[in-house]
Structure formats: C-alpha cells, structure tokens
Image: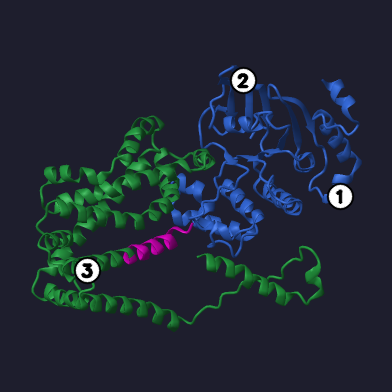
Amino acid sequence: MSSSAPKLCVADVSMAFKTPTGAFHALAPVTLSIPQGRFVSLIGPSGCGKSTIFNIIAGLLEPTGGRVLIDGVDATGTIGRVGYMLQKDLLLPWRTVLDNVILGMEIQHVPLRASRERALPLLHRYGLAGFEYLYPSALSGGMRQRAALLRTLLFDTDVILLDEPFGALDAQTKLKMQEWLMQLWSDFSKTVLFVTHDVEEAIYLSDEVHVMGTRPGRIIATIPVPLARPRIRHSVLSGEFLAIKERCLELLHLDPKGPEAVNEAA
Amino acid sequence: MTAQDTTTPVGAMARLDRSQPQPEASAPAAKPVRRLPVQKDWPTWALITAQIGILVGALSLWEIGARTGWIDAFFWSQPSAIAQTMTIFFTTGDAWADISFTFRSTIFGFLLGTTAGSLLGLSFWWSRNYAAIVQPYVICLESIPKLALAPLIILVFGIGLVSKVAVATALTLVVSTLTAYAGVKALDPDGEKLFYSLGASRLQVFRKLVVPFCLPWIISVLRVNIGLALTGAIVGEFIASQHGLGRAILYAGQTYDIALVWVAVLVLSTLAVVMYAAVSWVESMLRKGVRQ
C-alpha cells in the first residue's frame, strides 16, 4: 500500500439545509485527508457540523457539494462503506449481546454460525466474557458501549466513525473505556475518526486533532499530537500535552485567560 | 337530623376533654400524633370464604325472594329454575353447537382482525406519503361505531358464520392498525440510521428492526381484541343467525324464557373468561419470547 493515497478523503464537502428563512449553511467546504491506520479527532462547539460530516461520510446524507473518497474511490452517498457508531449504543433489546454484535455481518449475509464463531473470541478478549448470551438490559453503560463498539468493529470496514461514544459515561468509566479503545485500535489497525466534546480525550487518543468552528461549520485548525505511543495516563500532565490542550481551548474560545481572548478572536 | 347535628359536637367535645389533662394540649395547634395506617392482610381461606359467602348469600336471597313473591320470578327467574334449565340446555339442547359457533366466529374474527390490522399498521412504515394519505381514513374508521355497520355486514355476508366473523374482524382491525402504527411512530430514527449505516436494505430494516420493535405493541392489544371479537360475534348473532349463544339469548328473551337467558349469559361469560385466560397465556409466552 502506498502511503500517499489517503484511506479516507473528504474533499470540499459542504452542506446547506433549506429552511423557511432561507438556506442554512451547516457546513462550509470541509477537507479532510486521513491516512490508513490514523486516529483523528474532531472537536468543536455544538452545532459545528461534526455529526453532519459523519452522516455524509456514512452515506446517510447527500452533501450539497464535494465528494467523499475511500481508498481514492468515490463513496459519496453510498451506505455500508464505513463503520459508524452513534452516541447511543442502539443495542436491540430483543437480541442477546452476541446477536447484537454480529448485526453488521448478518446484514451483509454472512452465515449466522460463521459470524457467531468470529464474534465469540472477540467478546471474550475484550471484556464481555460471560455476557454473550445476556440481553442488553443486563449490561452497565460501559459494557453496552463496548458491545456497540465491537458491533462496529465486526462490520469489517477499514474506516470507523465514532460519534461521542463515551459522552454519556461517568468520568471513571470513560477513562477505562479510552484505554480499552486504544487497545482495540492498536490490535485492529483501523482508521478512526472520533468526535468528542472532551478536549483532553481528543488529544490523549489522537494522532491529529481538527478543531471546528460554527456558522458555518468548518475546520479552523489542525493540530498534530506528536506524543509517543503507547500513551500513559501521566502524559496528560506533561508540558507538551498541556500546551496542545491550551491551544485547543484557545481555538474553542474557552481560553482560561478570560473574555478578552474571545473578543480578540472575534 | 337536627338531634344528630347537636349530638355530634358534644361527642367531639367529650373526646377533646379526655385529652385535656395532658399539658401539651393547652399549647395552640399541637400537631396530632399519627401513625402509618396499616392494613392487616386476611389469610387466603378467609378471602375465598368471603367471596363464596357473598355469592351464596345473593343466590339464596334471590331464590327466597322469588319464592315469597318479593321478586317477580317471571321477569327475573330464579336460581333453581336456572339450574334446571342449565341441565336441559346441556343434555337436550344443541348447547355445544351454539358454543362452538360463537367460539369459532370469535376466534376467526380475532385472528383475522389482529393480523390484518397489525400488517396494515406496520405497512405505514414503508412510505410516509402512503401513511399520510391513508391515515385520515383509518381515523374515520376508528370513530365510526362499527357495530352500527353490523346490519349492513349481515346483508352482504349472509346469516352464516362469515358475517359474524366479519363483524368481529371489523371491531378488532382498527384497534390493531392504530396500535401497530403507534409502534411504528415510536421507532427511534437513530435505530434506522444504524441499520442503514451497516448497508441494510429496506426489507432488512423492516424485518430485523421494525417488526420486532413493534411486536410488544401488537401483543399488548391481544387481550383487548379478544373481548372486542366476542362482542362483534354476539352482536352479529343478535341481528340474524341460526346458531350461537347470542342467538340463544335473543330467542330466549323473545319467548320470555328468562331462565334460558341467564343460562346462555352464564355460558357466554364462561367462554369469555376461558378465551381471555388463553390469550393472556399466549401473551405472556410471546412476551417471554420477545423480551422487552
């Protein structure tokens, strides 16, 4: 594989919605280029179009302009090309954990027995041993997210979109889930696009953080995260990490220096 | 009345007086000490004895009243006569044919109405335009008292079993349709989003998401529908029929055979209870299967 061709390319994608008061520009032309195996985060205030970008990449929304390329091939408006995990786990309450996890394969007509055989070892290895035949109602929030993520992974696409997967979890569970996700990512070498509200989470997990702005939604800065991997919890206290965090917060207009910074930026 | 009015305050005063000796009572607006009311549960045998006692008491009063002429036995009949008629009904009459007729019309109407209604309700998921066009008609159908259409249905379908099934179907169909449609409307759009992101076809979303999601809604209406179906079947028999418990009731009423009216009503109630219990059982089994 040549490293020059990006795995996922979002080329000048824009989105405008018609409203009674005229067109609403949800997304100014946005360009993203993500090489194979990268972990890239999008952060930004609510309403900056993060979810719109995800819906467009997943083919659930036809962009007003621009194209989505996967492996250099046009994938605009086609579904089933990327794994997409929404903030809600959306586990089906009438299916066991195992049968929830294989949903993607089932939809792709993989024989039931083969997909179960593939899923079981993964459930065991990634912290869901003993829960395979339980229904989702018996699982804690963290466990449900794990099952939802494994469902996304087992869908077998190179690109995975994670839309605030840990947004609804408590702080402690969230940290555990981040470590767990890092483990999965290094085991499966997927290309991950991650949306979060949590700046620290974005930096800790990512190779690169894109900061977005609103009205219209656009990328205002791209910040590389050169911290060595595997990362440890302590690195969130390192000077390098804090410098990146400060820069991100500044860009998000959440600068601790106060409202002057906001005015300056505006 | 006035005598009672004056005595009550005196009684209250007397009670107050008894509490006077305590020093706190002189303080203004002392909070009354109140304990949590506790109900003692009777043992099961006592409850059952009470229930049987009421039944036996009521029947005895009825019988005695009828014998002493205090109750007009011509209009109300009496338990002993009803028991006699019951024996005759089951030994010489065509009781089982009547029961079977009513049972069949009810079950066929129930199955047909529930199935067709559920499918119709689920079908609204397929197209928003189609749902928008058809919905007003469904609501109109709901507001029409379906039983008022029964004479027309009998006219069209004849006086046999088919017309009774049709009335029972008419009653159950709309309820099922609206309930299944309520399920469809409660569907989380994000669930559909998940399925489509996995590359699902519309048929796959329907079979693997919409149907299982709406099943609890459909199941929840089964018990209501069995009652409605029975009502439909009986009303159909009232209007025109040669068989069935509804016809037996109507015939007995017209010939002033009040004991037979009671017998038929009793048998009908038993049938209703049995069917209700059976559907409840089916419902609990289905619920276990659906897990929601």
| Extent of the magenta region | B277-292
Q: Amino acid at mark 1?
A: His
Q: Which chain does the numbered disc 2 sit on?
A: A
- Give how far across and how far down residue A52 sits, in percent: 61, 30
Q: Which chain is green in the rendering?
A: B
Q: Which residue is mark 1?
A: A234
Please report the residue visible at 67 percent of the width from the left and 41 percent of the height from the top: A164
Query: Which sits in the foreground, B37 or B1?
Result: B1
Q: Position of residue B162 (x, y in %)?
A: 15, 51
Quadrant of the drawing holding the C terminus of chain A: top right
User: What chain is tagged by disc 1?
Assistant: A
The quarter of the picture where residue B247 lies is bottom left
Residue A133 position in % (x across, y down): 53, 62
**Nearer-the-camera pick, A258 or A113:** A258
Drawn side of residue B94 relative to residue B273, left or right: left
Residue at position x 30%, y 66% in the image: B273
